Each structure stands twice: as C-alpha cells, then as structure tokens.
Amino acid sequence: MKSSDTKIAFIGLGLMGVPMAKNLLKAGYQIVGFDLSKEVAAKFSDDKGFQFASTPEQAIEGANITILMLPDSSIIDAVLWGSNGPAGIASKLSKNSYLIDMSSSSPISSKENNHQLERLGIKFIDAPVSGGVKKAIDGSLAIIVGGKKEHFNELQPLLECMGKSIVHVGDAGAAHAVKALNNYVSAAGLIAASEALNAANKFGLDPHIVNKVFNASTGRNNTTENKVENFMLNDAFNSGFSLALMRKDVQIALSFIENMNCYANLAKQCVLTAKEADEKLGKGADHTAMYDYVRSRAL
Ligand code: NAD
C-alpha cells in the first residue's frame, strides 16, 4: 500500500494523535482528520496533505484506512456504532478498508468490534502504543499489534512511520490486552515509587539520592528512571499522560485479569488508589501527580 495512494481518516487528535498524524504526513500520506475540538485544526496549518473534517462521516469518505486515537472504549463504541442518535461510522466505512484502533481500549470490546466489523467487510487491527508524547513526536513509539497476520504485514510500513518497535502479539484484541497489562505494571511501579520516596523524605532522606540508589538497584523501573526527576520531585507533573487515562488503563487490566479468573489483589489496590487520586486532583491532572496525591495523604 503506497503512501501516495492511501487516504487516511484520523479520528482523535489529542496529545498523542497530533504528533502521530504529523509523522504520517511527513511520510507522504494524505490525512482527513476529525476531533471534537475544532481548535486542533490550527495545529496542522503548516502541514501539506492535511484537511480537517467537520464530521467523522466526512473524514472517512473514501478513506482506505481509518485510525482511531480516542480516550476509551465507550467513546470508540459511540463513534463506531452510535449512541442515542444516528448510527456511527462503522456502516459507512469503505468495504475492504482498514480500521486501526491505536487507543488504549478494552480487549473485550475490541474482540467484539473486530467481529462486527468483519461482518461489514472491514479489516480491523488493534495497535495501541507505548512511549508517551515524546516518542510520539520523534516517531519512536512501541506499537503492539493484534489482528490477522496478513493485515499486520500490509500495515507494517505505515505503523513504522509512527513507531520503532512494532510487535504482532496475536489475534484482534490481543494487543489491547497486552497494553492494559503493561500499563497496570507501570502504574504499580509509579504508585510504589511515590509511596517509597514520600516515606524516605519524611524520614529526613534526600529523595533524589534515594531514587539514585533505586536506579542502581533492583527497585529500578520506568518511573524511577524517567519520571521521578523529570516530572515528580520538581513538582512539574506534566508528562503528557493524564491520571484519568491511567485510571482507565488499570481498570481495563483489572477487568481483564478478573475475566480470566486470576488473582488480582494488587490490581484492585492500584485501581482504588488511581480512583482516589483522580477524584482528589480533578480533571486535567497528570499521572505523575500521583506523587503529589501520596504526599497529601496521611496513613
Ligand atoms: P487526549 O485526551 O489528549 O486526546 C483524545 C482526543 O480525542 C481529544 O482531542 C478529544 O477531543 C478527542 N475526542 C474525544 N471524544 C471524541 C469523539 N467522540 N470524536 C472525536 N474526537 C474525540 O488523549 P491522548 O493522551 O492523546 O490519548 C489517546 C489514547 O492514547 C488514550 O486511549 C490513551 O490511553 C492512549 N495513550 C496515551 C499516551 C500518553 O502519553 N498521552 C500514551 C500511550 C497511550
């Protein structure tokens, strides 16, 4: 599939969607984008090959590939199938076109969406990403892919415009399962590091030195290596990944683990902590503000 012959509809142009779409434009793809927020159109004013649509239906007209980069599965289901109003875009997608859900969605919903889309003659893959806004900008995201191997093979060159490590993990929904489990493990590391550094600080220790020790020892994780100094101990709390999205991800992971009938004690605690922090810190809080929340709490 050559970039010059491919028209992409890109729905969901937020913190991640904008830089991902820009990397596709750089590779020569034509994009018609749609987002509920009309202001995002201005972010593409210097980009050739981009048009902003006034409805999702307009964005998908004639598209060979539709990419979704939306907050969660309830929004994706409303966009695809409609909610309370006219039906969504699914029945209007071109036959034999691809729908790629790059959001961090529920694996159970994605399996069902794949099933329903197949009946409409649409090819589905789930392709959630890891790496955050910085890696979205420089095109080095890790992309996990679920769906038929032949679909993966055909779409790999397009995915390589946005990511460096592209791994096919199984059938439709498999990538969303792996993504949710990854984000659960990551959130557990964030909460553990926040609690440990807060207690160390109260004991009179320098949290910068403690974190250095973690990074040279077995407590090292993505939070201690990349978040503590850049976003947490300096009170910046601006990594670009919201606490609300982290809460959603750990909830997806917990539901998945429970659905598999597996032990999930720590996942339950992570969901509870993420819920409490999200409610206390309010809309717009970054996930690294978990440290701020932990600091504000007594035993
Ligand atoms: P975001 O909130 O910045 O962007 C979501 C965009 O979707 C917004 O611009 C919003 O206006 C738009 N939107 C919401 N409902 C819509 C609808 N019905 N129709 C059209 N547009 C709609 O979120 P983000 O940080 O870009 O994350 C997007 C997805 O990627 C989420 O599933 C998230 O979990 C995942 N993700 C985020 C990061 C990160 O670091 N931010 C990293 C990896 C994965």
Image (cartoon, helix red, strand yellow):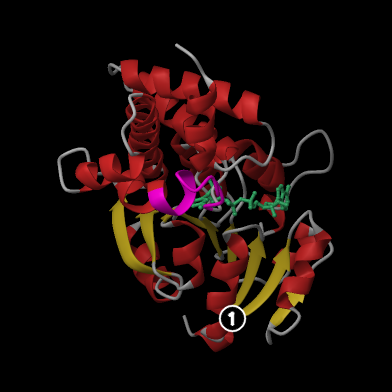
Q: Mark 1 belongs to which amino acid? A: Leu
- Outermost residue to the top: 299
The residue identified by callout 1 is 25
In the displayed structure image, the side of residue 164 where residue 287 appears, left or right: right
In the displayed structure image, the side of residue 125 where residue 58 appears, left or right: right
237 or 103: nearer the viewer: 237
Is residue 52 in sight in this rendering? no
Q: Secondary structure at mark 1?
A: helix
Q: Position of residue 201 (x, y in %)?
A: 37, 31
Above-or-below relation of 135 to 126? below
- Quadrant assignment for the C terminus: top left
Is residue 139 in sight in this rendering? yes
Q: Residue at x 39, y 73 (%)?
A: 160
Is residue 231 found inside the magenta-colored segment of the image? yes
Characterize the magenta stretch by its predominant secondary structure.
loop
Q: Position of residue 232 (x, y in %)?
A: 47, 44
Is residue 149 found inside the magenta-colored segment of the image? no
Badge 1 density bin: few <14, some 14–19, many ≥20, Cα 10 Å:
many
Q: Position of residue 170 (x, y in %)?
A: 30, 49
Q: Position of residue 270 (x, y in %)?
A: 42, 24
Magenta segment boundaries in residue numbering: 229-239
- Tell me where residue 45 sits by quadrant: bottom right
Q: Residue at x 41, y 38 (%)?
A: 180
